[in-house]
Amino acid sequence: MLEVEICRMKMKNPTVLAAGVLGSNASSLNWAARSGAGAVVTKSFGKEPNKGYPNPTTVEVEGGIINAIGLSNPGVETFQGELEKLEGRVPQIASIYGSTPQEFSEIAGKVENLVDALELNISCPHALEGCGASIGQDPDLTHSFVKAVKKTVKIPVIAKLTPNVTDIVEIAQAAERAGADALTLINSLGPGMRIDLETGHPILSNGFGGMSGPAIKPVALRCVYQVYQNVDIPLMGVGGVTNYRDVVEFIYAGASCVQIGTAVMYQGLEVFPEINQGLLKFMKEKNYQKVEEMVGLAHQGRVR
Ligand SMILES: Cc1cc2nc3c(=O)[nH]c(=O)nc-3n(C[C@H](O)[C@H](O)[C@H](O)COP(=O)(O)O)c2cc1C
C-alpha cells in the first residue's frame, strides 16, 4: 500500500533520508535503510575533499535549525569506497556538487555504477564560491549543469532546487527541459542568521546559513504545489516534515515521495517507521489503495 515508484526506483514507502543528515558514510546510510526509510540520499560530495567551515556550523532557531556546514566531505574518491559498502536494501541516491558542468559530469561518471540515481545539489545556500545556490538561482546555468550530467550518465538525474529565488517555476522548467528525471524541492531556506548576545557576533562561523525544520514547511509546500502545476516530471518534497500529516500535505501538493532531514536529528531514525505507520492508518481510514492516488489531489480539491 505504501509502495511508490519514482525514476524507475521501487520504494517500499515514500519516506527518504534527505541529503546531509546522517549520509556521510555507508554505515549510517545502511542504518537508515534498515530503520525503515524507503530510500536514502548521501551527504553531498564533490571532486576533492572539503573541510567545510569551522565550528559552530549549526544553531537552533524557533522551529528548526540554521546550518552552514560548507559542504564538508571527503571527496569522490573516498566516497566511492563508502558507496561500495552500501547494502542495497533500498534505492540509493548520491548527492553531488561541483563548480562547473564538467566537474559535475566527472563525479557523476565515477559513481554511476554504485547508486540508483544522482541528486544534483545546485542549491546549497552557504556553499563555497562557484558551487551551490548560484547555479540553481539561474535558469540557464541550471539547464547547462543538468544537461551535462544527463549526457554523461544513464541513471536517473534528480535536480535539487533552492527556494531562494524569485520564481522557482522557471528554474524547475529549465531543469526539466535539460532532461532532469525528477526534482527535489527544497534545499534549506535563507540564508538566515543568529547573533550571540554576549559577544555581539554572529553565532555561526560563516555568519549565515540555511534554515531547515518545521519553520520552512509552508515555503517548501508552496514550492511543490507551484512546480507541480508547471512540470511533468515527478517531485520529491522536502522541508520541515516531522509526522505523517506533513507527508500527506506534501503528497496532496504534488510530491511523489518526501525526504526527511532535520527531524532525523531530533527524533532519530524512528521517525521513518512512525511516519509510515501513521500514513498507512490514514490511507486505510480514507480508503486510499495507493500513495499514487493521493499525489496532487490538492489541485483538484478532491481529497477524501
Ligand atoms: C545539517 C544539515 C546538512 C545538510 N546537508 C546537505 C547536503 O549536503 N546536501 C544537500 O543537498 N542538502 C543538505 N541539507 C538540506 C536537506 O537535505 C534538506 O533539503 C533541508 O534541510 C530541508 O529539509 P528538513 O527540514 O527536513 O531538514 C542539509 C540540511 C541539514 C540540516
Image (cartoon, helix red, strand yellow):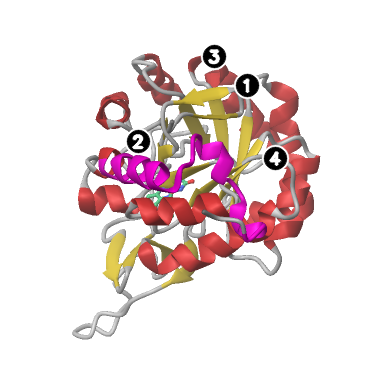
Q: Which mark is residue 23?
A: 2
Q: Earlier in the sequence, mark 2 or mark 1?
A: 2
Q: Label 1 crowding class (10 Å Cα cut-off): few <14, some 14-19, many 20+?
A: some
Residue at x 72%, y 55% (from the top left corner):
229
Badge 2 amino acid:
Gly
Q: Earlier in the sequence, mark 4 or mark 1?
A: 1
Q: Which residues are magenta?
A: 274-301
Which residue in the protein does label 1 denote?
A: 155
Badge 4 amino acid:
Ile
Magenta segment main secondary structure: helix
- Pointer 2 residue Cβ closer than 8 Å to ligand 1: yes
Which residue in the protein does label 3 denote?
A: 113
Which numbered disc, 2 or 4, marks the residue closer to the eye? 4
Judge from the rendering whether residue 38 lies leftward or rightward of residue 111; answer left or right.
left
Q: Earlier in the sequence, mark 2 or mark 4?
A: 2
Residue at x 42%, y 43% (from the top left corner):
283
Check whether the beta carbons of the residues at disc 2 and disc 1 lie within 8 A of each other.
Answer: no
Which residue in the protein does label 4 denote?
A: 233
Q: Tell me if I can see residue 127 in this picture.
A: no
Q: Tell me if I can see residue 221 in this picture.
A: yes
Q: Earlier in the sequence, mark 3 or mark 4?
A: 3
Q: Label 2 crowding class (10 Å Cα cut-off): few <14, some 14-19, many 20+?
A: many
Give SS at disc 3: helix
Percent from the top left, x then y, of residue 276?
Answer: 33, 40
Check whether the beta carbons of the residues at disc 1 and disc 3 lie within 8 A of each other.
Answer: no
